[in-house]
Image (spheres, rainbow, N blue to C red):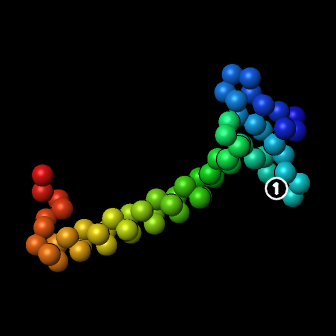
Amino acid sequence: MTNWVSPLLGIRFDWVKGEELVLLRPDGQRFLSSVELDRRLQIAEQRANRLADRLRAIGINPDSE
């Protein structure tokens, strides 16, 4: 099943030597693992908190609508 491409989804399933199964999007980019997605979420949340703090510092409440 090395380099098998789903005819319906266009997703490529590939076994990389020394790694586990790698899933590639139709454009060739690798799908992120749950660990990578979680890390990106943490970084985005930290950034959002910093930006909210900056807005509060200049008198804008980011939580109000």
The residue depicted at 23 percent of the width and 74 percent of the height is 54
Nearest to the observer: residue 8 or residue 20: 8
Indicate the quadrant where residue 35 lies.
bottom right
In what element is the residue under mark 1?
A: loop
Above-or-below relation of 33 to 12: below
Residue 52 location, x and y as percent? 25, 68
Q: Is residue 54 left or right of residue 5?
A: left
Nearest to the observer: residue 28 or residue 19: 28
Q: Is residue 23 left or right of residue 37?
A: right
Q: Is residue 17 left or right of residue 55?
A: right
**In the current view of this chain or complex, which residue is farthest to the top?**
8
Nearest to the observer: residue 33 or residue 44: 44
Q: How crowded is the residue under tag 1: few (<14 C-alpha within 10 Å), some, or many (20+)?
A: few
Q: Amino acid at mark 1?
A: Glu
Indicate the quadrant where residue 58 lies.
bottom left
Residue designated by label 1: 19
**In the current view of this chain or complex, which residue is farthest to the front?**
27
Above-or-below relation of 10 to 61: above
The residue depicted at 38 percent of the width and 69 percent of the height is 46
Q: Quadrant of the N terminus?
A: top right
The residue depicted at 74 percent of the width and 27 percent of the height is 6
Residue 9 location, x and y as percent? 66, 27
Nearest to the observer: residue 17 or residue 12: 12
The residue depicted at 84 percent of the width and 38 percent of the height is 3
Q: Is residue 5 left or right of residue 8?
A: right
